[in-house]
């Protein structure tokens, strides 16, 4: 009996199989295109399952699959000799998954054909999404099997993509409501505006119409505040202004919002710093790189990168592009040109309402950033 898988799960599997079939991966450009001049050979892919670690060694014609365990120091202890699977079988499985991703519309769940289910059993894959504690989807050794393993996240434009920043209520920024002092009935009226895709915008505009002013105050979560201050002591204010503009002006792309920030200059810095040094772009790229390489709102960030060292992006055409921290400038430019601010759930993330704290009203905005679909 066949089973169902999400597009995100299949996107990860597609990337995994494509690497094993091709034995190489192209680096991506800042525009999310294939760099024809840079291609890295893939020697080994390591994937975690519920029952241990699998290593997939890529040979000329076959992939050797070895099961085992990882010691605390990262040493791999094989538990068996391993089995050989033709690389062309992975090629066929990747093509089948790509066809499913391209042709299935509507529901995120896809029924997996029995032929693919049988192949998954044959290559010892039982968890559609790899089981890791370090947030990597799998690790890759380039050039030769003794090379250091590099941890990657997979993002597939043919499916829903995990955001770069999805901190929930820990990623809220606080704006203090100043200007006119609102009576409780007025606050209730503002908060009671009907649910809609633009309800946060409508509340902010209503506050302005009634004479209120929303002024940046603080980051709601102590750890997230410190993480943002690691980028720059004024970065939280800059970020809050970008999120505010996203709601009020309907601009979501990070690059476009940064251009608007250059015009409004919320940090009141000198023109030379803005235009000659590219201050606002530079700070945003630093932030995006930190997010891609491990910064999370509720975990202390000290500038040290995590086990995630890059992103493997599946394009709408099924091309796999590699972005790695060793190509830092290209990686940062890609994130800058291909990311956007998104709107999280108001109920879940607890933002978008006037709330009273110690006699003062605050209006929280939520920071959520993901990759664009195109």
Image (tube, grey):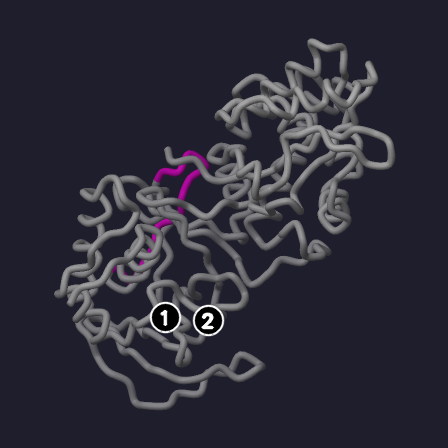
In the image, residue 28 lies in the stretch drawn in magenta: yes
Q: Which residue is mark 1?
A: 44
Residue at point 70%, 55% (across, down): 301
- Corner quadrant of residue 228: top right
Residue 370 position within the rendered picture, expressed as x and y whole percent measured from the top left: 49, 40
Quarter-of-image position of residue 22: bottom left
Residue shown at 36%/76% (left/top)? 55
In the image, residue 28 lies at what x, y percent? 40, 44
Pointer 2 local density, CA inside 10 Å: few below 14, some 14–19, many at least 20: few
The residue indicated by pointer 2 is 147
**Can residue 269 be seen in the rendering of this structure?**
no
Q: Residue at x 49, y 81 (%)?
A: 70
Looking at the image, residue 319 lies above or below residue 142: above
Q: Do labels 2 and 1 touch, CB within 8 Å?
A: yes
Residue at (53, 45) in percent of width and height: 164
State the residue in front, 361 or 240.
361
- Find residue 93 and report its image quarter: bottom left
Residue span colored magenta? 22-33
Label 1's element?
strand
The reply, left or right, for residue 141 in relation to residue 183 is left
């Amino acid at each position: 009996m066949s089973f169902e898988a999400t597009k995100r799960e299949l996107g990860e599997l597609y990337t995994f199989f494509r690497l094993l079939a091709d034995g190489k991966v192209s680096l991506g450009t800042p525009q999310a295109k294939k760099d024809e001049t840079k291609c890295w050979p893939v020697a080994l892919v390591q994937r975690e399952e519920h029952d241990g670690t699998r290593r997939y060694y890529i040979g000329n014609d076959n992939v050797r699959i070895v099961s085992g365990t990882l010691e605390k120091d990262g040493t791999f202890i094989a538990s068996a000799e391993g089995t050989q699977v033709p690389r062309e079988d992975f090629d066929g499985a990747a093509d089948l998954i790509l066809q499913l991703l391209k042709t299935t519309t509507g529901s995120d769940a896809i029924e997996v054909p029995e032929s693919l289910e049988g192949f998954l059993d044959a290559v010892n894959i039982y968890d559609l999404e790899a089981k890791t504690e370090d947030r990597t989807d799998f690790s890759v050794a380039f050039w030769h099997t003794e090379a250091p393993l590099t941890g990657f996240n997979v993002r597939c434009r043919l499916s829903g993509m995990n955001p770069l920043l999805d901190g929930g209520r820990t990623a809220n920024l606080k704006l203090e409501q100043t200007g006119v002092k609102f009576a409780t009935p007025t606050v209730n009226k503002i908060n009671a505006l009907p649910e809609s895709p633009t309800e946060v915008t409508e509340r902010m505009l209503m506050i302005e119409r009634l004479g209120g002013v929303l002024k940046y105050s603080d980051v709601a979560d102590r750890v997230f505040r410190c993480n943002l201050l690691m980028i720059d002591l004024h970065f939280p204010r800059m970020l809050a202004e970008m999120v505010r503009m996203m709601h009020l002006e309907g601009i979501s792309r990070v690059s476009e919002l940064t251009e608007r920030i250059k015009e409004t200059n919320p940090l009141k810095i000198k023109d030379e710093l803005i235009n000659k040094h590219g201050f606002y772009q530079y700070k945003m790229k630093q932030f995006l790189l930190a997010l891609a390489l491990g910064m999370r709102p509720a975990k202390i960030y000290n500038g040290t990168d995590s086990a995630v060292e890059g992103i493997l992006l599946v394009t709408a055409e099924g091309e796999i592009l590699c972005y790695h921290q060793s190509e830092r400038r290209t990686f940062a430019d890609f994130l800058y040109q291909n990311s956007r601010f998104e709107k999280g759930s108001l109920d879940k993330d607890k933002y978008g309402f006037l709330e009273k704290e110690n006699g003062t009203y605050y209006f929280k905005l939520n920071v959520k950033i993901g990759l664009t679909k195109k």
